[in-house]
Image: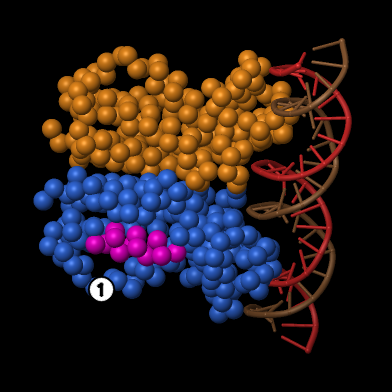
Chain colours: A orange, B blue, C brown, D red
Amino acid sequence: MSTANSLTDEELGSAAQRGRRKRILDATIALASQGGFDAVQMRTVAEQADVALGTLYRYFPSKIHLLVSALGREFERAEAATRDKPIPGDTAHERVMFLLNRTTKGLQSDPHLTEALTRAFMFADASVANEIHAVGMLLNTMLTRAMNPGSEATSDEDVAVARVIADVWLSTLVGWVTGRTNAGDVSKRMDVAVGLLLRD
Amino acid sequence: MSTANSLTDEELGSAAQRGRRKRILDATIALASQGGFDAVQMRTVAEQADVALGTLYRYFPSKIHLLVSALGREFERAEAATRDKPIPGDTAHERVMFLLNRTTKGLQSDPHLTEALTRAFMFADASVANEIHAVGMLLNTMLTRAMNPGSEATSDEDVAVARVIADVWLSTLVGWVTGRTNAGDVSKRMDVAVGLLLRD
DNA sequence: GACATAATAGGAACACGTTTCACTTCGTCC
DNA sequence: GGACGAAGTGAAACGTGTTCCTATTATGTC
């Protein structure tokens, strides 16, 4: 696996290049959504994005980088769409579960896409650290905001709890993606975990 | 990915067959230990186990099945070695941490092997459910026993806590394996998580 | 506008997981 | 002991991620 990074949108000079990058990610999402991890074939992505295979590899040094970058973009999109909406719920537990349920439902509405992205996320190695880190930060931000809706300083404990919740959520998601847990159990297990962690 | 199962030791008739299976798993562990996931190449495993490639695939229908089965054998070995030793510690928290630290230290002493096995575990899909389930049960048994050392009935809450701990541990392990978390942080993060879950 | 440089296209080639197939060996039943 | 099916061998072939190479096209500089 190569050690280079994916090209981010910001460091791309021309509009044509940003266009290529966008077409590549769009094709990736479309293929993943339709057939999951295996359907995201580099030749197919390149063809569908109207880009040469070599160019695809110039933008994203591996299939994993590509998928994790796509995941990042989707996550940002989802986060941006809900950034300014207050999360309903009287307790941290309720708000966190609202957030998790909403996100989980979104993921479960496109199982193939979720499978592809989760697989990539879990398979990624150190060379994908940057892309992974971006996703992790986003996730933690969303969770701590749900726990602590005002913009008061977030406590260390909140951060720790958010990390544990994120870990459990990821494991559970992997279980669902790989067919070991059914959709309903994801919610149930998250509720149990959140209940144990946020006793208010 | 094929849907067949790995051949278990019990369902193998002859001693020659059990020998083949053992040689295959030994070769797998040796290669993984030396070079990690990528070094476990099916041709190399077959060659080193003195078995034809087709035979290897008859015993283990994919590289993932092979690695997860190897993981299962290692886990059983580790569990059997410590089954009857009482776990030191005055509280559930201490005992669980003792167990986690001992296991984590064992894993970290062979990073390549751990990388290979964890990668396989996280990448596995539904066709590997049996092999995965065996590992999951073992892990949960070990954790609930640490939490609840007598053989008193294990409560539902204990089981739920054990599952959450296992989830966090897996996520953290993945972080370590993929170079996102260093070895010391694994312990620290597990301690925080266990502290949140077992407040005694 | 001419040129240097970088980016892209197009496609061949390689690596490794997986499949396939023709053949041989082994175990079992009569 | 021979016949038969299951298991094993050996090698070729395929699919897909990845790399590499050359020709062509943009892009920026004087």
Q: Chain of mark 1?
A: B
- If the image is split into quadrants, where does the C terminus of chain A sit? top left
Q: Nearer the viewer, residue D9 or B111?
A: B111
Residue A1 position, x and y percent, is 60, 47
Q: Quadrant of residue D2?
A: bottom right
In-image side of A94 versus B167 (left or right):
left
Residue C4 position, x and y percent, is 79, 27
Image vertical order of residue B15 relative to residue A38, above or below: below
Residue A100 position, x and y percent, is 32, 29
Q: Amino acid at mark 1?
A: Asp
In-image side of D28 versus B113 (left or right):
right
Confirm whether the magenta stretch covers residue A182: no
In percent of the image, x 48 and y 62: which residue is there? B113
Residue A7 position, x and y percent, is 58, 30
In percent of the image, x 52 and y 31: which residue is there? A69
Image vertical order of residue B53 relative to residue B4, above or below: below
In-image side of B165 versus A129 (left or right):
left
